[in-house]
Image (spheres, helix red, strand yellow):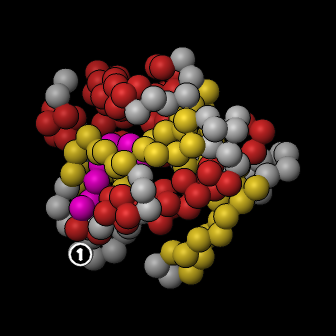
Amino acid sequence: MTTDDLKRLVRTVPDFPSPGILFRDITTLIAHGEGLSACIDHLAHKARAAGAQAVAGMEARGFIFGAAVAARMGLGFIPVRKPGKLPVKTIGIDYALEYGRDRLEIDPTAIREGQRVVIVDDLIATGGTALAAAELLRMAGAHVTHALFVIDLPELHGAERLRGAGLTVEALMDFPGH
């Protein structure tokens, strides 16, 4: 399947979670076996080209795509978690949201010093979470140069923000609006 075929599998839900928002729902994509498999193939191809030695994904939808890409490539997966979800000593990073703050945590023993880690997530909007994840992975010793997404919302400038921080950003598709 082409990325155009995959794009047609993404459902748009108007006015969710608030009026004026066009929510890009991946549920219809991941429910389509051939589409999900093709999506993982496309992302794995990009991760392989980036020299990935491991894949990281952010909770929760990044787990869906990131773990599948890692498995397809025979690599390990590094879960980037919300606070308090890991049973071991973690390192974390606080980051700003549009209205407030949040935190991400990882198990630093999941990463080897200098390991090439590619970030995979479902969607890039403002880029705040992906930027924090990249910084956190780097704090743990990872070499992070690439972030891959299924969907980019370019009008929110997240990909630009990540590129400004030295990351190569690729998405399988983009949608107008926010």
Q: Nearer the viewer, residue 86 or 49?
A: 49
For the record, the magenta segment spans: 147-154
Q: Is residue 6 above or below residue 149?
A: above
Relative image position of residue 31 (x, y in whole percent): 35, 32
Instruction: Specify the quadrant that holds the C terminus.
Output: bottom left
Looking at the rendered image, the quarter that the N terminus falls into is top left
Compared with 22, 50 (above or below) is above
- Other-residue count near label 1 (Cα within 10 Å), few / some / many at <14 / 14–19 / ≥20: few
Q: Which quadrant of the structure image shows residue 78?
A: top right
| Occupied quadrant, residue 16 | bottom left
Let me know if residue 40 appears in the view.
no
Q: Residue at x 14, y 36 (%)?
A: 4
Q: Residue 157 sits in which quadrant?
A: bottom left
- Residue 151 within the segment the image draws in magenta: yes
Is 88 in the magenta? no
Above or below — where is 52 with respect to 13? above
Task: Provide the residue designation for mark 1.
Answer: 20
In the drawing, does residue 142 fall left or right of residue 126?
Answer: right
Relative to the observer, which residue lies in front, 30 or 138? 138
Residue drawn at x 29%, y 24% is 38
